[in-house]
Image: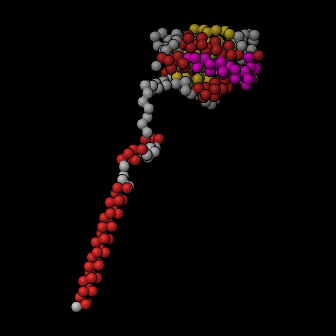
Amino acid sequence: MINNIKAVIIIFALSIIVFFMSIFTIIRQFNYEVSEPVSDAKIIDTPAAMPPYLLPTTQTDTPAPTPMPAPARVLIDPGHGGSDYGASSDTLGIDEKAVNMYIALKLYSLLQQDRDRVYVNMTRFSDASVSLHERASMANASYDFMISIHCNTSNTSSVCGISGFYQTHAGIDKPFTSEELARTIQGSAAAATNAHDRGIVEDYDLYILNHTTIPTVLIETGFLTNPLELKQLQDSVYVDKLAEGLRLGILEMANRVIESRR
Ligand code: ZN
């Protein structure tokens, strides 16, 4: 009997303990939810930093830049070459083809710094035989204008200076005439060197001028029969000036080609 009473008391006590533990657990859970709510405002106040590449770009009214027109295509023709020596004699001591190439290579080299405005090529880069037909065909196929580089000779040693030869290609030349090209290139070369300015000459006897369909000038850069010019045309400092003068004339005409494409 006493044992039964003890068992009832123990069961009752355990029930009481379990009851209060349950109550305690419920109260704790309630307090937690109330004291630490997840606030929407808290999320808005502390946004995560957005990577710069995801930030919206500022819209402006600046139009997209207009693409630069393609550079002018210029063909330099070092006259003669290979079995064609040009002006040549024992008294000169040098062949015209070599002097022409010396000038042309300096000019070609200078124009490499102007690639945004000029794409430049040459009819020959070595002492090669290139026919006049090939030179004219190359020019007509894909160039805007052509500069043929030569040296002059005279029976009179005192004759000197720079001259430009051209032919009127009526209705064909564009965006300027061969005369305009000749005047600009010849004038620029004469000014840069202080050489005697012989001006420009319209000529219908030169094959290269007869067979080109683009603006073309044949520049006689000096007289090999004039002792001073023979020396100057082999002098690095003088030829640098000459090449720079030719370059400035070419750039002026290249700008006109580019403007005509806008
Ligand atoms: Zn020549």
Instruction: State the image quarter where residue 12 is shown.
Output: bottom left
Q: Is residue 174 above or below residue 237?
A: above
Q: Nearer the viewer, residue 167 or 82?
A: 167
What residue appears at the point 71 percent right and 10 percent down from the top-left corner?
196
Q: In which quarter of the image is residue 93?
A: top right
Q: For residue 189: magenta?
A: no
Name the residue located 50 percent from the left edge and 20 percent from the top edge: 258
Is residue 84 visible in this depiction of the protein?
A: no
Q: Which residue is drawn at 43% across and 25% down?
A: 61
Residue 28, given in percent of the width and then of the height, sits at 35, 63
Q: Report x, y in % for residue 39.
A: 36, 49
100 or 94, which lies in front? 100
Q: Which colour scheme is used?
A: secondary structure
- In the rendered image, which quarter is residue 3 located in? bottom left
What is the x, y in percent for residue 43?
39, 47
The secondary structure that most of the magenta stretch takes on is: helix
Residue interval drawn in magenta: 229-253
User: Quick check: 100 left or right of 169?
Assistant: right
User: In x, y percent, where is residue 64?
Assistant: 44, 27
Image position of 229 with respect to 98: above or below: above
Q: Which residue is drawn at 66% across and 9% down?
A: 198
